[in-house]
Amino acid sequence: MFIDTHCHIHDQEFFNNEDAIIALGGAKDNDVNQLICIGTSLEDSKRAVRFSGLNKGCYATVGIHPHEALKLGESGIQSHLGQLDKIAGDDTVVGVGECGFDFFYNNEGDSLSLQERLLRGQIDIAIKHNLPLSFHVRDAFEQFWRVFDEYKGVEGVLHSFTDNEVNLTKALQRGLYIGINGISTFTKHEWQRDLFKSVSLESIVLETDAPFLTPVPRRGTINTPENVIYITRFLADLRGEESDLIAKVTTANAKKLFKI
Ligand SMILES: [Zn+2]
């Protein structure tokens, strides 16, 4: 059995109700029996919680993506974090995020300080509710480690990790899991594939990030959680390991991290 540790099928911008149910059925047919629906804003987190409450095998995280920081501003961040804290106690919630830093798309003006405020607030919520975090970090690891290292006992996953060996090593030293998705199947960078090959299985969780980042051989279609099987097959080939072993170990990792 597989777990998709990072998807957005609750997000009605991409999946209407019918599509979401079809995606869920496809996942179950392919032995992807548990999915984690990742919140990216306050409203989206509420949807993730609602969707997970209605659908067996689905769990939610509540989080606000760093892309939201500049839009929300200081007062918006404060009020949204307050409301996020309230829904973090829901039974379906297994984590906080996705949260972090993204300087690839957002590096102007007050973005750094606002993203930092937003990240710190979510780490506080995770600690308070004893939840792991799903981190989104893009082109911003220096800032991320500076903040992360101020906290003790924070557990989580670096979702969609594509950074270099130095930051991979830092993540592993800190006990973070590495979220591997379809990028592994289509990246043009040999060094990235080498990293996906070298990470110990004990530190990997699988994810699709559906509807984005569709793996080979489904490129050109909307990504759905069942495509975790193609990521697994690709990793099996790349790493010279049995698919069954990858499924077994990464599922155990995900269960341990998200306590599901
Ligand atoms: Zn995502």
Image (spheres, rainbow, N blue to C red):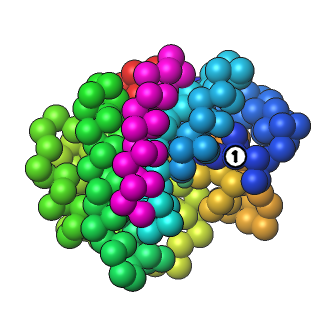
- Of residues 3 and 7, the one nearer the viewer is 7
Q: Residues within 10 Å of mark 1 (few under 14, many from 20)?
A: many
Residue 106 visible at all: yes
Question: Is 126 above or below relative to 73?
Answer: above
Which one is nearer the viewer's eye here, 14 or 26? Answer: 14
Q: Is residue 55 left or right of residue 184?
A: right
Q: Position of residue 77 (x, y in %)?
A: 40, 53
The percent position of residue 175, horizontal first and vertical second, equals 21, 42
Query: In the displayed structure, would residue 103 be above or below residue 159?
Result: below
Q: Is residue 231 visible?
A: no
Q: Looking at the image, which is closer to me, 247 or 83?
A: 83
Q: Quadrant of residue 169?
A: bottom left
**Residue at the farthest front position:** 75
On screen, residue 158 above or below 155: below
- Residue ranking furthest to the right: 18
Task: Give the amino acid type for the residue marked by disc 1 in the picture.
Answer: Asp
The secondary structure type at the circle numbered 1 is loop
Name the residue: 84% across, 37% down. Answer: 17
Locate residue 4: give its quadrant: top right
Q: Give the side of residue 14 with respect to residue 124, left or right.
A: right
Q: Is mark 1 within 8 Å of ligand 1?
A: no
Q: Report the side of 194 relative to 32 (left or right).
A: left
Residue drawn at point x = 36 percent, y = 81 percent: 109
Give the magenta part as a residue range.
Answer: 73-98
Which residue is at the front of the view, 215 or 137? 137
The residue at which mark 1 appears reads as: 11
Q: Is residue 119 left or right of residue 89?
A: left
